[in-house]
């Protein structure tokens, strides 16, 4: 287990990051980790979670987040790591070994670096410390004022460490490396004078005096324009030292004198023309007192055999209309700052990997004074990959090797390439690589060279063998996509139809290639409106065709990726296209493809490596919309077979979930006659896991049922919906009626009295809980009749109970009592204890309403005697509450309060907030205890959050 603050606030475990949820929960965790092993007061946590006036229920919100965080840690076996989230009065403390916290390890490594005698050992410690950073500190959290201060402090510590590492490199004479490190950070923090001063000295010591002076003037102008100030003493002193040709000992910090000497005065600050000031020194005049600049610590790169005086540059032109990607450009700069770095830009076809690489390469020419090489490896091209010897030959010729001296074999050519680049500072861009082995052959030999690789594959072998640093590239956000359109079409045209422009960006899925094709179509047709094209693209059947122009298009790019996949992965991709939902696990993928989960998982991993699917959570994948459309076109004839496979998978899995969640319940139905049992069905360890699956899959189950209805597979549609009844009972006010109305349409289309009765019974109950009593009564009148026609006595009993609840609300209490009593007889006749318990529970509640507390108590006790201890938590809580209220009505206040408190505790323990509210509400009618009010309000808040 590892706690991370240096980047996105997260908890890493052996199985992946914990799903921390909303930003405020991450803020809570960050606040506790920043004061690890020290109590943090509720007031301090409130300041961290809210920027302005906190809500009145802030205490309850914090307690809810603490409760969920505690459950997450317990589920990750936190106790085994010595981790505990404890409550201490009005405060909380997160106890954890300091070794589990990245910010603590960062500080420990800094301390060790300060204790090292030699700069080489200090470099190792400082690099290890900086490697802990995964992005801006405390990312992903809502930063209240204390957290903003903490994040700023951590970032200041990181920047100070960067400066310390640069000085250590300087002490080793590795000034180029110090300059590369500082250049990347200075670009991100252009107003930090200490960084600029360090960079100026590193550039000067590397023999790059003109760049050092240019850095000063750029920083001076920026300070004047942005802040209206002149350079401080640190920057001015560094400038003066460089002008005098005496930058001080390598590795020392820039001097911080109290006053700048005349020679140190920056231009415009009043230095006299005859004082040896900046103007004369910069112009090349001599100064008898100024020593000659020191020689660079490394010998200069050897002249090329052909005597070429200019650095080689094979880069294609910079991309036009490039927008966004600030985070990825910054990530590339950070990745390129290490020793002989290999930066790996990965992502799906058309996402803009090459554009990003070229944009970065063209932005940083000063980092590579010896040149920039480029090769398109065509790893996903119909033309095939170039021979490695051809690529090496082009590189060697560009470096000045005579054509006759280029070796004929790949190993010899690669060895010569490494030798020639050993003392150079080059950028090598290897575009469209398909495998790690090809890239390894083309890696340069110099420690100051940077290799930038782009690939549709993850190239994990390159990460393992050469410490390649991945920079994954995702689709563009809607605003960046709209900006890309404006860059091609002109801002006027986009601003004239802003809504349509955003819609086009969404329909293109944020894929730059799709957006550029769309823009190209519109640019060639000035009379077309953006709204009209958006309407065309909204039709999925022709969207891919519209996104092709000449020889460029989304389908063509995807086709080149797919042609390199093994047959099993292609088959899996084609079947994924026919899934009506958005997410896939190995069980669903296996059902679609007619395989087993192990085979399906292997295929999904291959597709993920090719960036055709994305793993959003462990064991859960998703397809980009345009990839889904392309996948669907691979095997359109298999659509119905794949759909039936996934429908039957949903039925089988939902059955397993319902059986686990409610083990005493009767089966909802028999399976369809042509039901195809999947090769494997997911097991659920307990009720919590089963309910979690039902909640997670709710949207996909609804989409699947809708697809079944559209395909005329109504016998599957109503079953998939009805099987979600445990979740519907648990979260009854969570807008279930539209889904149940779809199930009712399917049942009636099948002319299935059994199905119609069961759906009406559940829908009527949901409508009752939503306060739509009249509608519920009209539906439920029909349900018992249909159940009798279908020969379903247990269904009739459940229908009678739900009808009785409505009748009681409408004031027809005698009729309601009769229907409940009839339901009890039916369940006893069938010998179904579970359903009998349900009917007795409602009969007891109605006796209570009719002011018959003894009869209510007798019914509730009988029901509790029927159910084992593991009976459904909601039902036990409701029965205990009836017992408690009956005892109160009979005058036994002590026992009544005890039973109601027990009912509330069981509901709270199992997350049944509605039951907790009901029991605690009854308690508050007879008791003014603060604890009951607090628990009641917390349960109400949880209900509000989940609604």
Image (cartoon, helix red, strand yellow):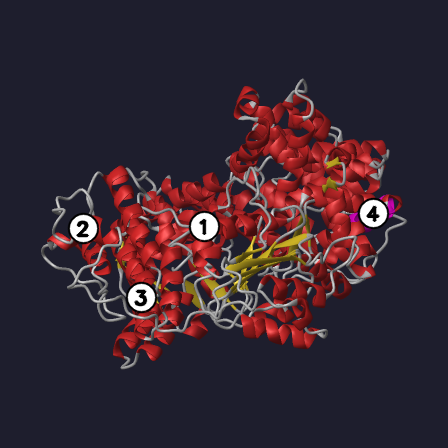
Q: Which residue is mark 3?
A: 205
Give the CA distance from mark 3 to mark 1.
73 Å
Is residue 895 visible to us here? no
Label 3 or label 4, whichever lies nearer to me, is 3
How many C-alpha atoms fall within 10 Å of the one at disc 3: few (<14), some, or many (≥20)? Answer: many
Identify the element where label 3 is drawn: helix
Q: Earlier in the sequence, mark 4 or mark 2?
A: 2
Identify the element where label 4 is drawn: helix
765 lies above or below 245: above
Q: Quadrant of residue 30?
A: bottom left
Give the CA distance from mark 4 to mark 1.
55 Å
Q: Earlier in the sequence, mark 1 or mark 2?
A: 2
The residue segment tinted magenta is 638-647
Residue at the outermost bottom position: 117
400 lies above or below 725: below
Label 1 or label 2, whichever lies nearer to me, is 2
Q: Which residue is mark 4?
A: 634
Q: Earlier in the sequence, mark 2 or mark 3?
A: 3
Q: Is residue 353 magenta?
A: no
Q: Position of residue 166 (x, y in %)?
A: 33, 66
Give the CA distance from mark 3 to mark 4.
60 Å
Residue at the outermost top position: 527
Label 4 or label 2, whichever lies nearer to me, is 2
Q: Which residue is mark 2?
A: 232
Instruction: Give the residue at x 37% y 62%.
Output: 179
Label 2 or label 3, whichever lies nearer to me, is 3
Which disc, if any, is residue 904? 1
Identify the element where label 1 is drawn: helix
Who is closer to the viewer here, 607 or 392?
392
Label 4 or label 1, whichever lies nearer to me, is 4
Q: Earlier in the sequence, mark 3 or mark 4?
A: 3
How many C-alpha atoms fall within 10 Å of the one at disc 4: few (<14), some, or many (≥20)? Answer: some
């Amino acid at each position: 287990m590892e706690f991370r603050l240096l980047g996105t606030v997260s908890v890493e475990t052996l199985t992946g990051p914990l799903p921390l949820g909303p930003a405020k929960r991450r803020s809570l965790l960050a606040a506790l980790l920043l004061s690890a092993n020290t109590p943090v007061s509720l007031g301090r946590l409130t300041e961290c979670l809210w920027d302005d006036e906190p809500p009145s229920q802030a205490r309850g919100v914090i307690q809810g987040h603490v409760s969920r965080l505690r459950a997450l840690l317990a589920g990750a076996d936190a106790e085994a790591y010595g981790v505990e989230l404890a409550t201490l009065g009005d405060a909380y403390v997160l106890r954890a070994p300091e070794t589990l916290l990245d910010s603590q390890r960062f500080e420990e490594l800094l301390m060790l670096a300060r204790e090292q005698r030699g700069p080489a050992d200090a470099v190792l410690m400082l690099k290890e410390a900086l490697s802990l950073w995964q992005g801006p500190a405390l990312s992903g959290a809502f930063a209240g004022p204390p957290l903003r201060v903490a994040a700023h402090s951590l970032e200041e510590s990181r920047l100070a460490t960067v400066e310390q590492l640069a000085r250590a490199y300087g002490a080793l004479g590795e000034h180029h490396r110090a300059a590369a490190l500082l250049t990347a950070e200075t670009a991100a923090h252009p107003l930090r004078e200490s960084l600029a001063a360090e960079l100026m000295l590193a550039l000067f010591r590397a023999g790059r005096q003109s760049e050092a002076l240019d850095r000063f003037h750029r920083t001076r102008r920026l300070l004047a324009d942005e802040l209206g100030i002149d350079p401080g003493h640190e920057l001015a002193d560094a400038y003066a030292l460089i002008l005098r040709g005496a930058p001080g000992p390598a590795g020392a910090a820039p001097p911080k004198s109290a006053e700048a000497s005349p020679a140190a005065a920056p231009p415009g600050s009043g230095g006299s023309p005859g004082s040896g000031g900046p103007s004369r020194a910069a112009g090349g005049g001599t100064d008898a007192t100024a020593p000659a600049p020191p020689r660079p610590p490394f010998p200069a790169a050897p002249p090329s055999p052909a005597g070429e005086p200019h650095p080689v540059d094979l880069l294609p032109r910079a991309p036009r209309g490039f927008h966004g990607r600030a985070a990825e450009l910054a990530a590339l700069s950070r990745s390129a700052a290490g020793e002989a770095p290999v930066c790996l830009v990965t992502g799906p076809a058309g996402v803009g990997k090459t554009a990003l690489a070229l944009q970065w390469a063209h932005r940083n020419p000063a980092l590579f004074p010896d040149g920039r090489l480029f090769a398109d490896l065509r790893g996903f091209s119909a033309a095939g990959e170039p021979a490695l010897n051809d690529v090496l030959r082009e590189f060697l010729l560009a470096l000045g090797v005579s054509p006759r001296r280029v070796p004929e074999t790949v190993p010899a050519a690669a060895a010569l390439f490494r030798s020639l680049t050993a003392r150079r500072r080059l950028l090598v861009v290897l575009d469209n690589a398909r495998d790690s082995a090809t890239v390894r052959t083309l890696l340069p030999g110099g420690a100051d060279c940077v290799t930038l690789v782009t690939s549709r594959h993850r190239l994990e072998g390159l990460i393992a063998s050469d410490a390649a640093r991945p920079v994954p590239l995702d689709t563009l956000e809607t605003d960046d996509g709209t900006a890309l359109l404006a860059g091609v079409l002109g801002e006027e045209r986009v601003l004239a139809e802003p809504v349509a422009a955003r819609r086009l960006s969404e329909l293109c899925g944020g894929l730059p290639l799709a957006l550029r094709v769309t823009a190209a179509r519109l640019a060639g047709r000035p009379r077309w409106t953006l709204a009209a094209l958006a309407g065309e693209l909204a039709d999925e059947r022709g969207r891919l065709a519209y996104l092709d122009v000449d020889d460029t298009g989304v389908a063509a790019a995807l086709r080149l990726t797919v042609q390199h996949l093994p047959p099993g992965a292609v088959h899996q991709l084609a079947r994924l296209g026919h899934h009506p939902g958005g997410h896939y696990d190995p069980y669903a993928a296996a059902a679609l493809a007619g395989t087993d989960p192990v085979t399906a998982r292997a295929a999904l991993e291959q597709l993920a490596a090719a960036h055709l699917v994305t793993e959003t959570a462990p064991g859960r994948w998703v397809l980009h919309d345009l990839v889904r459309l392309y996948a669907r076109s691979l095997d359109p004839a298999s659509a119905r077979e794949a759909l039936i496979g996934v429908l039957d998978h949903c039925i089988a899995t939902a059955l397993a979930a319902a059986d686990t969640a409610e083990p005493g319940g009767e089966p909802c139905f028999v399976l369809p006659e042509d039901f195809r049992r999947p090769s494997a069905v997911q097991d659920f360890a307990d009720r919590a896991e089963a309910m979690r699956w039902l909640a997670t899959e709710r949207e996909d189950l609804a989409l699947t049922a809708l697809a079944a209805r559209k395909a005329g597979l109504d016998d599957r549609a109503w079953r998939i919906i009805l099987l979600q009844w445990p979740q519907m009972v648990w979260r009854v006010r969570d807008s279930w009626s539209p889904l149940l109305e779809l199930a009712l349409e399917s049942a009636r289309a099948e002319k299935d009295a059994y199905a119609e009765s069961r759906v009406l019974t559940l829908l009527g109950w949901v409508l009752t809980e939503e306060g739509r009593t009249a509608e519920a009564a009209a539906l439920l009148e029909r349900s018992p009749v249909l159940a009798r026609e279908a020969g379903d006595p247990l269904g009739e009993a459940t229908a009678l109970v739900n009808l009785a609840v409505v009748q009681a609300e409408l004031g027809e209490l005698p009729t309601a009592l009769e229907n409940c009593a009839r339901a009890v007889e039916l369940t006893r006749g069938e010998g179904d204890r579970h359903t009998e318990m349900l009917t007795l529970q409602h009969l007891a509640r109605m006796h209570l309403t009719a002011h018959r507390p003894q009869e209510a108590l007798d019914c509730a006790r009988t029901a509790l005697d029927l159910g084992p201890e593991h009976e459904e938590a909601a039902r036990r809580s409701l029965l205990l509450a009836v017992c408690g209220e009956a005892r109160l009505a009979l005058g036994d206040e002590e026992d009544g309060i005890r039973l109601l408190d027990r009912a509330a505790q069981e509901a709270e323990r199992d997350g049944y907030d509605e039951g907790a509210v009901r029991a605690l509400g009854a308690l508050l009618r007879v008791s003014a205890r603060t604890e009951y009010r607090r628990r009641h309000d917390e349960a109400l808040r949880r209900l509000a959050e989940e609604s």
